[in-house]
Structure formats: C-alpha cells, structure tokens
Amino acid sequence: MADPVGATKFPVDQDKLTQFAKDACEKAFEGKGQTYEHSNTKGWNDVIIGTLLNSLTTTVPPNSYKFIVTSTIIQHELKKEAKEGEPVPPPTASRGMHTASGAFWNQEKDAIWSYKQSGADGDSQREFDVVLTVAWVAV
C-alpha cells in the first residue's frame, strides 16, 4: 500500500509482501461468514499475524531481520433498519480511522509498511476491514 518511510531496502519484494498479507487475510476468513462477530476477532488476528510472520520468516534468510506485525479489524457501521413504509437506507462506508507510527532506527535497513484489505473489495463484501502493519529491523 504505502512505501516504508525512509527505507531503501525491503526484506522481500513489495509485491510478495502484499501477496503475503492478502493470503494471511484470506486464510483467516476462509469458509467463515462475512459478518463481524467480536468474539471471532482474536482468532482472526491470531491466524493473520501467525500466517504473515510464518511467510516472512520462511522467506527471509535466518537472523537477518526481526519482524513486528499488527492487525486491526475495523467493523463497518451497523446497517440501518428501514422504518415501516420507508425504503431501506443504503449501506454506509466503514467507520473513520486514523493511525500513525513512528520509530528511530537505521533508515537504510529498517522500515514499516502497511496494507488494508477492505471488506468491500472483490466478492467478499465483509462487514469489516483489516489493516496490517509490518515493521522490520535489520539484525
């Protein structure tokens, strides 16, 4: 999604990193409903983070980077019910969200990257979005 601020080198190709993120999200939601259920968020995040970390650590040479992965699941606004005799209101966009990170590190080797999988993308039509952040620090 975004280039890492000040970084000159990715531990893996950006396209591969994006594919890792997509694959991790798809694995978490594979065969599951499209509805946001708060009780499922821990399990979804565990699968997403574990899958992404596994993809990174099995692709990058051992002991070359440390990785930090965060996953945020954002519920869309609840659907509004139609009042009797009125048409159903159209679905609304997801809730607003802003996040930021900062770090002091080696700008040539260390960086942070983010990815958003929108619930409205493609065929999924999920009631939530997923925002992933991957940070890496050269060892």
Image (tube, grey):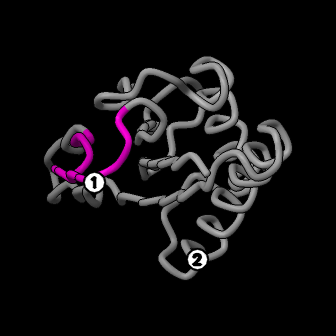
Tell me which segment is drawn in magenta: 91-107
Foreground mark, 2 or 1, reads 1
The front one of 68 and 110 is 110
Residue 40 falls in image quadrant: bottom right
The reply to whether dot 2 and dot 1 touch (C-beta < 8 Å) is no
- In the rendered image, residue 122, in percent from the top left (x then y), is placed at 55, 23
Q: Does the segment drawn in magenta span residue 119?
A: no
Considering the numbered disc 1 on the image, is that residue within a helix, a strand or a loop? loop
Residue 53 falls in image quadrant: bottom right
For residue 103, the mark is 1
Q: Residue at x 48, y 35 (%)?
A: 109
Q: Quadrant of the N terminus?
A: top left
Q: Residue at x 22, y 37 (%)?
A: 90
The amino acid type found where label 2 is placed reads Lys
Left or right: residue 20 versus residue 67 is right
The mark nearer the N terminus, 2 or 1, is: 2
Magenta stretch, overall SS? loop
Farthest bottom residue in view: 39
The amino acid type found where label 1 is placed reads Ala
Disc 2 versus disc 1: distance between alpha carbons? 26 Å
- In the rendered image, residue 9, in percent from the top left (x then y), is placed at 51, 23
- In the rendered image, residue 129, in percent from the top left (x then y), is placed at 42, 47
Left or right: residue 24 versus residue 101 is right
- Image vertical order of residue 20 relative to residue 33, above or below: above
Left or right: residue 85 versus residue 118 is left
Considering the numbered disc 2 on the image, is that residue within a helix, a strand or a loop? helix
- Image vertical order of residue 65 relative to residue 20, above or below: below
Q: Report which residue position mark 2 lands on.
A: 42
- In the rendered image, residue 86, in percent from the top left (x then y), is placed at 14, 46
